[in-house]
Structure formats: C-alpha cells, structure tokens
Image (cartoon, grey):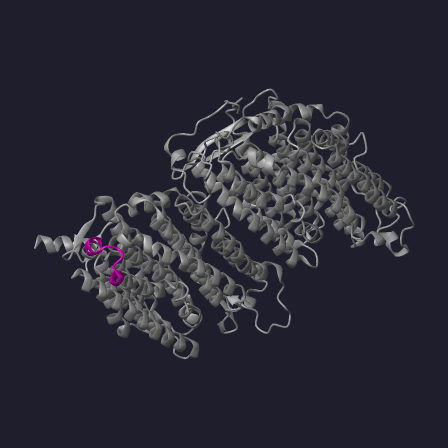
Amino acid sequence: MTSSFPWLSLLLLLPLAGAVAMSFATESTARWIALVATLGDLCVALPLWWLFDPQATQMQFTEHVAWITAPPIYYSLGLDGISLPLVLMTVGIMPLCVLASWNAITTRVPGFMAMLLIMETAMVGVFVSLDFVLFYIFWEAMLIPMYLLIGVWGGANRLYAAIKFFLYTLAGSMLLLVAILVLYYYGGHTFDILALSQGTYPASLQMWLFLAFFAAFAVKVPMFPFHTWLPDAHVEAPTAGSVILASILLKMGTYGFLRFSLPMLPDASHVFTPMMVVLSIIAIIYGAYMALAQVDLKKLIAYSSVSHMGFVTLGLFVLNQQGIEGAVLQMVNHGITTGGLFLCVGIIYERTHSRLIADNVGLASPMPQYATLLVIFALSSLGLPGTNSFVGEFLVLVGTFSWSKIATAVASLGIILAATYLLWMVQRVVFGVPAEHHLPKLRDLNRREFATLVPLVLLIFWIGLYPNPLLSRMHQSVTNTIASMSREKVAPTAHPSARITEPLLVEREGPLEIQGGLR
Amino acid sequence: MSLYGADLWALLPELIVLATACLVIVLDPITSASRRDLLAWLSVGALAICLGLTGWQISLENVRVSAFSDLVAIDAYARFWKILLYSVTGVTIILSLPYLKAERIHVGEYYGFILLALSGMLVMVSAVDLLTIYLGTELMSLSLYVMAGLNRSKLRSLEASAKYFVLGAFSSGILLYGISLLYGLAGSTRLVSIAGAIGTRGADDPLVLIATILVAVGFGFKLAAVPFHMWTPDVYQGAPTSVTAFMAVAAKAASFAAFIRVFVEGLGGLKADWSILFLIISIVTLLLGNVVAIVQTNIKRMLAYSSIVHAGYALIGFVAAGRGDGLSGGTPGLASVMMYLAIYSFMTLGAFAVIGMLRKGGIEGEEIEDFTGLAKRQPLAAFFMLVFMASLAGIPPTAGFIAKFYVFMAAVDAGMAWLAALALIFAAVSAYYYMRVVMVMYMRDPSPSSVAPPHLSTSPALSVVLACAVVGVILFGLFPNPLVSFALQSVLTLK
C-alpha cells in the first residue's frame, strides 16, 4: 500500500521544527514546545498502526524523491513490519523522556530539549530510511546530540563517558561507510536498500562486508566485547539520555543486523552464526554476572541491558522465524521495560541524589506507588509470564532450541541470573528499613511522574497478555527476510578469486539481476 | 589586435584584481587611519565584481580558451578555482577587518598584499606552462611571506615569516630544478609539450622520474603534505590569524589546482608512478598529522595539523584519479578533490574566523583552554564553532561529510577500499581532537580564578559572513547537488 500522504516525512519534520523553535524559547516554553512536538509526533505515528497492512509484502507509506544525482541517492522512506514497532516505540518513548526531564534539567533547557528533538528525528530516520546513504546520515547525525546530552547535562564523570561513547560508535560506523561504498559498486550502482538486499555478492566479499557491518552494529548493540562504553555512558547520562540510549539507540545495532547483514550477506551470516551465537551467550551470562556485582542502580540496569540485548542478537542469528520474531519483539520489550527502569532510577535520584542501592533502601512504605511500579518493571525485565519479556525471550529460546539445545540451555541460565539480580535489587530497594535522614525527601510519585510510568506498565501487560497484534504485523516482513536469505544467491561461478580491492567490471555492465521477486 | 582583445577579455577578472591591488597600495598613504576601512571594502567590491564577471563568462562560453600564446588556459576547471578563490579572499578580508583593528596592525598595504597573492593564485590555477605556474606560486608566496610577518611587534610573527621564507624559497628552488629538467627533456615548458615528450621517451626514463619527483617535492611543500610539512605548524601559529586562514585555505586551494593540472595534463603519462608516490605520501600525511594534532594545546597549531590531514584526504581522491582507468576513470577522483577543497575552505575559514574573534584581555586567545565555557558566554559563536568542528571531523549532516564521502567513493571506485577504510579510521581519530574543542566550549565551566574572561571582537559584516558560512556548511551537507555537478563539469575540461 502506497499512501500519498507523506506520513514519514511529517514524522521526521515535526521534531526538527520543534528543535528549530528552541532557538527562540525560554526555559519554561522550551519544555512545553518539546512536549507538544513529541506528543504531536506520537499522534502522527499512531494512525500508522491501524493503516499498516499486515498482509502486504512490500514497504508501506513509501516516499521516493531524487536527492543527489551523482551518485544516485534518494530520499527514500518506507515502513515494514520490522520497522513499524520500532518507530512507534521511539515516538512513544520520547514524550516520556521530555516529561522525565521536566524538573531534572535546570540548566540550558532549550538546548537540552533541542538535542532530544534532533535525536528523535535522527532515530526515526534510521528506522524508516530505504536508501543506504540516507540511513548512514541519520545514523551519524545522532552522534553529536548524544555526545552533548551526555557531556553537558551528565554526571560527574561525564566528559570521559561522552568522548568514549562518541569515539566507539564513530570508529564502528566509519567501517560501515566503506562497506556501503563497496556495496554500491558491487550491487549495481545503487544505494537502494531493497535492491541491494536482492543482490548477489561473492562469498569472500560478503565476509569482509559482514565484518565491517559487524564493527558498526556490534558496538551499537553493544555486543561483548564492545560493550564497555555502555555502562559509562548510561551512568553519566541524564535520565532522558539513559532512556534514549537503552530503549532506542541500542536497537539500531540489532536493527542493522536484521535489515542489512542478514538479507544482503546471507552466506556470511551463515558462516558467522556460530560466532554470533557464542558472543550473544557470553553477553547474556557475562552481563548478568556483572549486574549481580553492581552497587549503582544505573550500572546494574546497564549491564542487564548487555545481557538482554544478548537475547536479541541470539534470536537474530539462529536464523529462523521464531528466533527473529522473538528478537524483534524483544527489541520493543527491552525498550519499554528498561526505559521504565531508568525512569524509576531517575525519579529516585531526583529525591535522594544518589543512585547507590545502599542509599535507596526501604522505599515500600514511604513511596508505595513507586515501589509497585518498580516491582512491575523488574518482574517484566526478568521475564515473568504475563509480562512482555516472557513472550519475547520464550520465542528466542524456542528458535534457539532448533539450532542448538546446548545453546538454549546456557542462554536460559541468563534468565535465572536475571531473576537473581533483579529480585535481589528489589529486595534491597523496596523492602528494608529506609535511612532516617532520607525519609523527608521520599515523597511518592507526583502526577507527572505517574504519567511517565503508567503508559509503559500498560504496554508491558498488553504485550505480555496479547502479543498477537504486534506479532501479526511483523510476521510477513520476517518471512520475507528469511526467504531472501534462503534463496540461492551466489552463483557457483561468481568470481571465486574476487578480492575486496578488485573492482568487478562484470557486475558494473548491466543493471542488477533481480531474482525471485520477493520484496 | 583582435587576438589581444580576446586575451584581455579572458583575463579581465585577473586584471581587475591586479589593478585593485595597485590602487590600494597607491591610495594607502593618502588615506587617513580612520578611513582605512574603505580600502578593505574597495577590495571586497572588486572581488565581488570579479566573481560576477567570472560567473558571467562561464554562462557565456564554457570551452577552453587559450590566451597569451598558450601560457594560460581559461577553462571551466580554472574558473571553478577562481570562483572559490574570489569568495574565500573576500571572506578573509571581511574577517581581517575587526581582527587587524583589535591587534592594532590595521595597515592599508595588507589588502594590497592579499590581492597580489590572489593574483598569483589566479595565475597558478589557469597557467598551462610550468614557468608561468612558477611565477604564480612566487607571486603568491612572496606576498604571503610579508603578510606572515605583519605583526612586527610579535616575535612569533617574525619567526613565522622568516621560517616560511627560508623553507618556501628552498622548495621553490627544488620545484624550479624539476622544471628545468623537464625543459631539458621537452625543449619547452608548455605542459602539452612535456606530455608529448614523456610519451615519446617513455615513462621508464630515469631523468623523467627524477624531474617528476622534484616537482612533486616542490608541490608537496606548498600543499603541506608530510614529509614536507615542517613549516606549517610554526608558520600557522605565528602568523596573524587572518593570514593563517588565508594561507590554510586560499594558498592550499591554489596549490592543489596547479598541482592537479601539472600532474594530469603534463605528467599524466606517469600516472602509474606518481599515484604510488602520492599514495604513500597521503597515508603518511594522515598518520602523522592526526597523531600529532591530538597533543596540541594551541588551537592554531591544532588547525595547522588539521590542514595537513585534510591535504592527505584530498590526495586520496587524487590517487584514486591516478589509479582509475583512462581519463574518464579519473574524473570522479579529481572532482572529489575539487569538492573537498571547496568545502574544506569554508569550514576552515569559519573556524579561523571564530578564533580570530576570541580576545582574552587585550590579546588574542588562541589556546584551546581559552574556549572554556564559551557556550555559556557566547552561545551563538560556540554553536558556529561546533558546526565547523563537526564538519571538519566529517560528521553528517555537514558538508565535511559530503567532502569525505566523494573522496572515499572515488577510492573505492578505483579498487582501493582498504585505503578508504584506513583513512576513515584516521577520521575517527581526528574526531577526538575536533570534539575536544566542543568539549571545552560546552562541557567545562570557566574557572573562577581566570583573570580576564575571553570575549569576542566582531563586526556586523563578519557576523553575517559567519552565519552564511554555517548555513552553507549545513546546506551543502544536505543539498550537495549544485557543487557536485559544478565540479564534475569543470573537471571535464582538464586535458
């Protein structure tokens, strides 16, 4: 279905307009402009949920405008069942980030809100781009705003965390750019993501490209051993920054694997599957163990993110329907649940000015509403049946089971460990005796804070109890992805000796041959 | 006489620049100090006329016109560079005005020298004869030697001038030696004849190779490519900031223009040899420039190394052109170099303009530390600097990304994906020192003990120009089409 109304452009422009408006805003108006812009974006995005046709095999809401003529680069946007949930999650989380920063950010408020809005445009842009260069521009455009969000409004050690985040992600994405350029020449002189996904590439080239993609996406996920920027960035970032990082930014890495690595480089994906599965399982177990040892709430959740994102990459690389659907679902789930947990930490930090577990004990009696919601988020994070994460992790493990029983067994340990560190955290924070001098500060949630958390709780139970609307929308797209992988893509005679440095004249002659027609 | 008329018409913009330079020098003694601004505006006006005239000439006829018995060729390639040079010189003059006043070195002959240097550059970009090119480089260099020492009361400025002169003269000698060898081979200094002589003698002739290496070394000095870069940090640091900006931008662009023409039109037969030579030079330049830039504390020195690094990136496009098959194979590479320098010029000029504005007490604040907390005191200037730094680092959606994108695209096209990967890793390294400026501006609070908090000295015209540069850097990042097609068309006239 091609809609004539430019939904996606509107989705991109609205936050950007808000960011421009910030240059004329005062502190108080900045907050309202940001709230209106993000809520407006949500209102634009929500109809897409119903307008989306779950049966369609093509991209929907497409826009295709020539942008740069030489080389041909298009302003090309579209949504499918994989990007739809992620876009909705992004625009859904952003108003909550604005609300969470309402009183927490007191300096240079217009600048802060402008950065949030630019981030929103860039993040949505990453999920809807159908041109590889456009994708890359959105992908990189996030760096500077996020760098400033951490570095200007962050905690004590913010400078170190900001530059570490910046350099890690930049170094990774530089190799992605080379891979994009190489694909352009091998894939029939096009940056069109869909056309490139139909292409056939020599196996040795695929290996190189896979590693280049891996450098960019694995840093973003972050996969073990590229995860070390994450705890620093999470701990130092302001609450909204942590939420954006955990809920949305990390998903870009896994989205990249799913959108580019799997369909474009199927042979390499098959070859590297054991490595990816092993790295995922290491991340699951290692992240969980690190979380067990943390005394800082934000660090605990940061390491739990490493562990949970391990489930997502695991689901992706077992390369079957259940695994990938579970992974996409788990991307959304992690966004909701971990976003909620970071919001909870932000709320308690505003009261006690400490993120240490030891300083925040016994909140159940002074803050009953807060304690209830925190327990719900924690239970969702550990995958209790009835909550969203259970569905996602279950699907991932079912997918993994058909690939390797041992891998499934080891990955399941991660869930047990998650239960351990989360319940232990809940036990200390919620129950216990609060410190006497903290008591006057421990007010329960006000209406604004309540409003930031309740939507997430509702989503947790909705996906946990009735995930079918979400799964049915992604079903067709996941099927397409798997179908495009299983096609025999490499002709047996295709340049067995080809190296990455050799321009392939043969492929440049004519337009790309399209096989199968599955798009 | 009609022949001379055509010659003069082709060179009319250059003649206007030269006439204005003389006029400024004549008018200077009879202009009172209070009205010296008028000389600057006179120069800017002349440049605007030249810009319009060149644009008009492009729209009239865009074929190659040879003038003065084939000493110069007015083609689209030359006009691309001319338009760039007129613009950056105009911007330089506007940013010089408040700077020179604040430094109390506002003298009229400054504008004369800038225009004389520009005349030299204009000769460089259109000459198709080695001696004429040499004349152009000398006119440019001699003017710049004087301008570097403009701040006579400052030891560093004098040191910069002396160093620049000695090393510049040395490199000119080497260049001249290479030219004389080529003349000995071809019996002519015309690039066409040299190309013909190399064709008949073959590329393996040791004399040809020696001459090529000497010419490459001579140009290496002008481009500030490693290992011929030693003069750059000291000269850039010591010279008045407006002069540094002019050297880093206009002199580099003009040198690249002449360099490309000599090596493509004259020494194109040796493509296989010089592309390997410049491949090595570009890698070494990127490596050394980036690593040394990290440890700089003076922002002018840092930008000096940054300009070395950017020469390395531009050279990658040139190497890609050399490795391409046939002349059409080289087109994207050469066009990418032209785009790279055009974009580099404006972001570097912008960065230097902000540096020149920064005052600490009565003197110039040029340590990176002096930018501490600028975002709080001067949010707009800090934002401008942020955009220029992001662009220099090549982060989208700025023009700096587009510049790198096309260079690396040419490299991948020429089958050197590994070179693009290597250069991009260096780009990630360079982001560290550019982002450090941003970090200091935005994330550090000024220490309360600092005696004189830095402030800005600016003028309305400079603010307008800076705002235009920022908008340009972002707009060309988002809509590079006009620049791309202009560069691609211009490069086609190169023989």
Horizontal and vertical percent position of residue B406: 41, 46
Residue furthest to the top in view is: A55
Horizontal and vertical percent position of residue A446: 79, 42
Q: Nearer the viewer, residue B360 or A185?
A: A185
Q: Which residues are magenta?
A: B196-208
Q: Which quadrant of the figure has residue B71?
A: bottom left
Horizontal and vertical percent position of residue A475: 64, 24
Instruction: Give the vertical position of B124 relative to A372 (above or below).
Output: below
Left or right, A426 with respect to A230, comes to right
Horizontal and vertical percent position of residue A177: 50, 45
Residue depicted at 56% across the width and 32% down the height: A263
Q: Which quadrant of the figure has residue B315?
A: bottom left
Q: Nearer the viewer, residue B70 or A236?
A: B70
Query: Could one spot residue A337 in this view of the protein?
Result: yes
Q: Which quadrant of the figure has residue B84?
A: bottom left
In which quadrant is the N terminus of chain A drawn?
Answer: top right
Residue depicted at 55% across the width and 58% down the height: B432
Left or right, A263 with respect to A438, comes to left
Judged by its main secondary structure, the magenta piece is: helix
Question: Would you say residue B203 sits in the magenta stretch?
Answer: yes
Instruction: Give the vertical position of A73 relative to A297 (above or below).
Output: above
Q: Nearer the viewer, residue A30 or A231?
A: A231
Residue depicted at 70% across the width and 43% down the height: A99
